[in-house]
C-alpha cells in the first residue's frame, strides 16, 4: 500500500545530496594584477556521523571558543543558514597552530575534522576597496531570492564591482549525491558535478596609479580623486577617503568591528567618487561660459566690470575679491583665470537659466553616467520653471557660480572635464572586458557636442590661464601644461558679520567650504582628466590644486609606461 510514497521516502533516506560553493571569478586591474581573488583556507568542523560530544570542552579550549555555547547552537545556526547537513562548521580560517591542534585531537576523537574553505582575498586591501567592493555571507533574504546561495561558503557581492557583477562572478555550485546506510554513513558515491569558477572581470583601473593617488590623499580626512583617460573614457584611478579593509568582510565581522564602521562620522563605506554629492562651485563656470559663448550672449571680447559685488532686487551677491574692491574690467578668459563671480553674475542675468541647464545636461550633470558601480548617484539640476521666473532671478545668479540647486558627484565633474577638453560626449567606464562592457555602444555615443569650436577655444584658454597665472597656479606640473578650474563651495551661508569681521576661516571643520579642482593635461593634446575634492578643505586653489598636479604627473607616467 502507498508504494510510491514510501519508495520516495526510502530513496530520500538512502541518498544524501551535498552542495559546494564555487570559487568566485577573479577581478583584475588593466595590467592583469589580481584585485580580488579566491583562495583556500581551513576550518574546524564536526562530522555528526562520528562525533562524540564528550570532547566538546577540549575542542573549545584549543580553538578559543566559549565552552558554554553548546554544539546544538552551531547546528541550529547551520540549519538556519544552509539547511540540514552532516558537517557543522565550528571555526573558520584556522591558524597553522590551530590546525595542528585539531588534527592531533581528531586522531583521538573521531568526528572532529579540518576541511578546506573558500575565502575571498583582496591583495591590495584598502587601496581599491570602494571600486572593487567586498563580499559577505548571504542573508536570509538573499537566499530566498537565490537558492544557489544556500551553500556552505556561499558569498554575495555587497558593494562595487563585486555587487554589480555578482551573478557573473558567482560561478556554478558543485553537487554530490552519496548513498548512505541506516546509520547515515557513506556507502558509495553515486554522482558528482564539480563546481565551476565564476567568470573573471578586468577593470580599467591601474592599481599602481591607484596606490600612488591614495598616497597623494594620505593627509586628507575626507574626499575623492577621479582620473579619466580622455580618449577612451577609461577610469584609471578612483580613490575615496577614508577607506576600509574589504578583507574584514571575508570572515564573520565582529560586533565591535561593525560598530566602529557604522559609527565612524567620516563614513568610510561611502564611495565619495560616485556617491558623494557636492555643489561644484566655481568649477561650474566653464559650463556657463560655453553656453553663453555658443548662443552669442557674449563674445570673447565682452567685458563686465567687477566692483566686488552684484545687486539684484536689493540683494547683494559678493565676489571673492570683495576685500580689494573687485577685479575691475573682465573678459571671459580673464574671468575664468581669476574666477570672477561678478562677471558670471552678469552673464547669467543676460543668458537666463534655461541655456545653462541645457548645457549642464550636455556635459553630464543631472544624470547617472551608468558606470558599473551600483552606488552611483545622479546629483541634481534645478527645475527650469523656478529659475526662469523673474522673481527667482537670484537662483539663476547663484546657479552661475555652481551653487544653489545644483550638485554633482566627482565622477560627473570628471565627465564634464573630459568633454570640455575633447569636445566629445565621452562616457566613463570601469570594465575592460569587451564582452562585459558596452564598449561598442560607448563609441557610438561618443559623438561631438553641439558647441562651436570658438566657444570651446575661449573656455580652454581660460582654463589654461587658471593654472598658468590664475587661481590654480599650485597645480602646475612643470613638464607639461595643465588646464583647470578651482572651486570652493559653501556648505553654509556666510553671514554679514562673518564677512565684515573676517571670521570665516575660524569656522569648525564641518562648516568650512569644500575645496575642488577639475583639470586636464597636456593642454595641447589632452589625454588625462582629473577631479579632486577635499571636503571642508576651504580653498580649491590652495588645497585641491596641488593634489591635482601630483595626480596628473602620476597619471601621465602611467599612460607612458609599459602596457
Image (cartoon, rainbow, N blue to C red):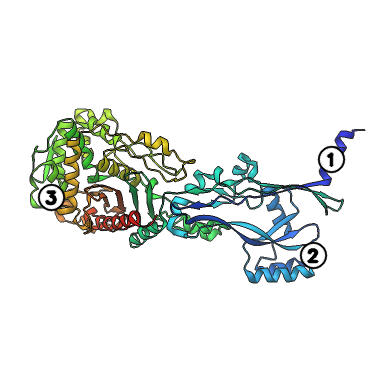
- In terms of secondary structure, where does tag 3 sit? loop
Q: CA distance from mark 3 to mark 2?
A: 82 Å
Q: CA distance from mark 2 to mark 1?
A: 30 Å
Q: Residue at x 38, y 52 (%)?
A: 237
Residue 213 placement: quadrant: bottom left
Pointer 1 or 3: first along the chain: 1
Pointer 2 or 1: first along the chain: 1
Q: Position of residue 134 (x, y in %)?
A: 51, 52
Determine if residue 122 is in view: yes
The dot on residue 321 is 3
On the picture, is 2 further left or further right than 35? right
Few, some or many C-alpha atoms within 10 Å of disc 2 (few <14, some 14-19, many ≥20)? some
The residue that disc 2 covers is 110
Determine if residue 70 is in view: no
Q: CA distance from mark 1 to mark 3?
A: 86 Å
Q: Position of residue 176 (x, y in %)?
A: 74, 48
Few, some or many C-alpha atoms within 10 Å of disc 1 (few <14, some 14-19, many ≥20)? few
Q: Nearer the viewer, residue 13 or 221?
A: 13
Q: Nearer the viewer, residue 241 or 385?
A: 241
Q: Residue at x 33, y 39 (%)?
A: 426
Few, some or many C-alpha atoms within 10 Å of disc 3 (few <14, some 14-19, many ≥20)? some
The residue that disc 1 covers is 9
On the picture, is 92 further left or further right than 479? right
Residue 53 placement: quadrant: bottom right
- In terms of secondary structure, where does tag 1 sit? helix
Q: Position of residue 325 (x, y in %)?
A: 7, 49
In the rendered image of this protein, does residue 60 appear above or below residue 459?
below
On the picture, is 77 further left or further right than 202? right
Which residue extends farthest front? 562
In the rendered image of this protein, does residue 54 appear above or below residue 143?
below
Instruction: Please tell me whether mark 1 or mark 3 is closer to you in this view.
Output: 1
Q: Nearer the viewer, residue 145 or 440?
A: 440
Amino acid at each position: 500500500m502507498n508504494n510510491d510514497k514510501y519508495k520516495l521516502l526510502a530513496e530520500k533516506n538512502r541518498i544524501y545530496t551535498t552542495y559546494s560553493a564555487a570559487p568566485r571569478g577573479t577581478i583584475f586591474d588593466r595590467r592583469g594584477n589580481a584585485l580580488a581573488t579566491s583562495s583556500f583556507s581551513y576550518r574546524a568542523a564536526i562530522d555528526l556521523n562520528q562525533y562524540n560530544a564528550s570532547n566538546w570542552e577540549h575542542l573549545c579550549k584549543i580553538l578559543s571558543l566559549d565552552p558554554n555555547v553548546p554544539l546544538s547552537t552551531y547546528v541550529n545556526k547551520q540549519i538556519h543558514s544552509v539547511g540540514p547537513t552532516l558537517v557543522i562548521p565550528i571555526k573558520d580560517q584556522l591558524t597553522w597552530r590551530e590546525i595542528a591542534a585539531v588534527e592531533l585531537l581528531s586522531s583521538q576523537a573521531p568526528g572532529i575534522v579540518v576541511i578546506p574553505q573558500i575565502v575571498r582575498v583582496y591583495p591590495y586591501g584598502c587601496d581599491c576597496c570602494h571600486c572593487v567592493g567586498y563580499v559577505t555571507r548571504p542573508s536570509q533574504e538573499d537566499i530566498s531570492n537565490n537558492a544557489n546561495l544556500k551553500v556552505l561558503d556561499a558569498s554575495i557581492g555587497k558593494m562595487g564591482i563585486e555587487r554589480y557583477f555578482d551573478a557573473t562572478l558567482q560561478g556554478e555550485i558543485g553537487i554530490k549525491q552519496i548513498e548512505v546506510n541506516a546509520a547515515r554513513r557513506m556507502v558509495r558515491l553515486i554522482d558528482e558535478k564539480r563546481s565551476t569558477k565564476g567568470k573573471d572581470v578586468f577593470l580599467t583601473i591601474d592599481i599602481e596609479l591607484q596606490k600612488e593617488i591614495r598616497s597623494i590623499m594620505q593627509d586628507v580626512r575626507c574626499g575623492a580623486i577621479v582620473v579619466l583617460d580622455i580618449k577612451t573614457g577609461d577610469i584609471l584611478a578612483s580613490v575615496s577617503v577614508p577607506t576600509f579593509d574589504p578583507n574584514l568582510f571575508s570572515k564573520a565581522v565582529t560586533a565591535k568591528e561593525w560598530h566602529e564602521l557604522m559609527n565612524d562620522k567620516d563614513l568610510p563605506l561611502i564611495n565619495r567618487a560616485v556617491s558623494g554629492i557636492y555643489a561644484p562651485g566655481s568649477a561650474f563656470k566653464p559650463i556657463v561660459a560655453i553656453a553663453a559663448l555658443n548662443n552669442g550672449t557674449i563674445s570673447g571680447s565682452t567685458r563686465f566690470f567687477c566692483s566686488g559685488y552684484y545687486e539684484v532686487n536689493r540683494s547683494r551677491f559678493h565676489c571673492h575679491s570683495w576685500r580689494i574692491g573687485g577685479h575691475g574690467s573682465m573678459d571671459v578668459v580673464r574671468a575664468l583665470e581669476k574666477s570672477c563671480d561678478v562677471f558670471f553674475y552678469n552673464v547669467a542675468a543676460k543668458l537666463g537659466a534655461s541655456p545653462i541647464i541645457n548645457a549642464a545636461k550636455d556635459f553630464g550633470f543631472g544624470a547617472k553616467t551608468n558606470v558599473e558601480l551600483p552606488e552611483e548617484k545622479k546629483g541634481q539640476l534645478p527645475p527650469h520653471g523656478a529659475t526662469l521666473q523673474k522673481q527667482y532671478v537670484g537662483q539663476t545668479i547663484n546657479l552661475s557660480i555652481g551653487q544653489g540647486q545644483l550638485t554633482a558627484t566627482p565622477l560627473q565633474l570628471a565627465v564634464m572635464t573630459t568633454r570640455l577638453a575633447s569636445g566629445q560626449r565621452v562616457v566613463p567606464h570601469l570594465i575592460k572586458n569587451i564582452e562585459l562592457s558596452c564598449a561598442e555602444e560607448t563609441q557610438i555615443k561618443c559623438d561631438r557636442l553641439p558647441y562651436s569650436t570658438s566657444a570651446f577655444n575661449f573656455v580652454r584658454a581660460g582654463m589654461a590661464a587658471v593654472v598658468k597665472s590664475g587661481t590654480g597656479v599650485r597645480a602646475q606640473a612643470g613638464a607639461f601644461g595643465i588646464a583647470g578650474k578651482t572651486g570652493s563651495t559653501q556648505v553654509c551661508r556666510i553671514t554679514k558679520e562673518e564677512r565684515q569681521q573676517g571670521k570665516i576661516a575660524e569656522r569648525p571643520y564641518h562648516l568650512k567650504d569644500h575645496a575642488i579642482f577639475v583639470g586636464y593635461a597636456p593642454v595641447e593634446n589632452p589625454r588625462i582628466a582629473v577631479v579632486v575634492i577635499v571636503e571642508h578643505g576651504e580653498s580649491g586653489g590652495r588645497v585641491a590644486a596641488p593634489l591635482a598636479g601630483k595626480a596628473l604627473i602620476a597619471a601621465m607616467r602611467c599612460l607612458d609606461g609599459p602596457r
